[in-house]
Amino acid sequence: MGYGRLWRAIVRARRSLSTGAQRRRAHASPDRTVTATTTPPETEDALFVSEVFTSIQGEGPFTGRPSVFLRLGRCNLECAWCDTKYTWLFGEPQRERVRQRVQQSADVSATVQRDWVGERVPPAYAKNEQLQRVPLSRLQQQLSQAIQGDGGVPARALVITGGEPLLHAKPLSRLLPRLFAERLTAVEVETNGTLWPHGLERWCAPPPMQQQAPPQLHFNVSPKLANSAQPEHRRIRLEVLRYFATQCAHGSIFKFVVESERDLHEVNRLVEAVGVDASRVWLMPQGTQAEELARAARERIIPWCLQHGYRYSHRVQVAVWGDCRGV
């Protein structure tokens, strides 16, 4: 082979290698992009918000405290008796899945059974109508105005509820310091106790381990019982509950929705397994009507609290306003 022919062959080979590499890069790029963005964008710079409103805290140890409520969307559980289904019950397949669980469960109350039969079955909500993806900067401005009173009396406490707020732990860990800088003095995070508080650890470590002295962050941990019609492996994670019981001992309580003696026995077993003191355990009646709550409190819940040393939590928002949103 002459020199000229040899040189042309080398050039063609180089071009072939270069083209093949470019093709491989083109095919590989989407995979790398997916791997690098396994966390959805909304969990990084925005939050799925259901509603923001000002009221008094109606449950738990801070009942009666004026607070700004931030209700977030999405949940990793599907509790049959949940009174905020509009934050997570999206689409007919999901609704049918919950309905079948209720029908197959021997643990849900008669009231819940009735609520999932015939015309009483809850609607399947449209996600785009119920949730708004709000950038952190805009949400900070909205919450700041509410915390400072927006022309009225300031409410220096923030209650983050849902849905399941700890699905949004990382963006919340970036939002809270901005709000603390604007005279926010107390934060309550309501959680089902199945998720770690990633990004929020610095505010819930035992006092001797704290690197700073931030405003108070308090977790209202509400483990779900069999009456929720959820499989136990989804609703109970003992290692997470023990973390809240020990590492957040100064800033957490455990709150259970109870209806029957069977629920009470399950609470007792969990309290023992987790190792939490009875003084940090709150029992709360199930229901969405004032008289329903009062009857359960009189006949069952308060006597159980007196018997076991637990605390009683009413649901002031239900007793005063009934089954309403934004209160």
Image: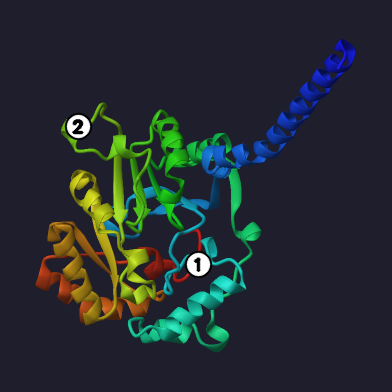
Question: Could you tell me which secondary element the residue under label 1 belongs to?
Answer: helix
Q: Residues within 10 Å of mark 2 (few under 14, many from 20)?
A: few
Residue receiving disc 2: 209
- Quadrant of the rendered image containing residue 131: bottom right
Residue drawn 39% across the image and 32% down it: 180
Quadrant assignment for the N terminus: top right
- Quadrant of the rendered image containing residue 10: top right
Q: Position of residue 255 (x, y in %)?
A: 27, 62
**Can residue 158 be seen in the rendering of this structure?**
yes
Q: How is the image coloured?
A: rainbow
User: Where 132 falls versus 16 (above or below)?
Assistant: below
**Can residue 61 be seen in the rendering of this structure?**
no
> Badges 1 and 2: C-beta atoms under 8 Å apart?
no
Question: Could you tell me which secondary element the residue under label 2 belongs to?
Answer: helix
Q: Position of residue 197 (x, y in %)?
A: 35, 45
User: Where 198 falls versus 283 (above or below)?
Assistant: above
In the figure, is residue 4 to the left or right of 285? Answer: right
User: What amino acid does circle 2 point to?
Assistant: Met
Residue receiving disc 1: 85
**Which of the two labelled residues, at mark 1 and mark 2, occupies the earlier sequence position?**
1
Residue drawn 34% across the image and 66% down it: 233
Q: Position of residue 320 (x, y in %)?
A: 40, 67
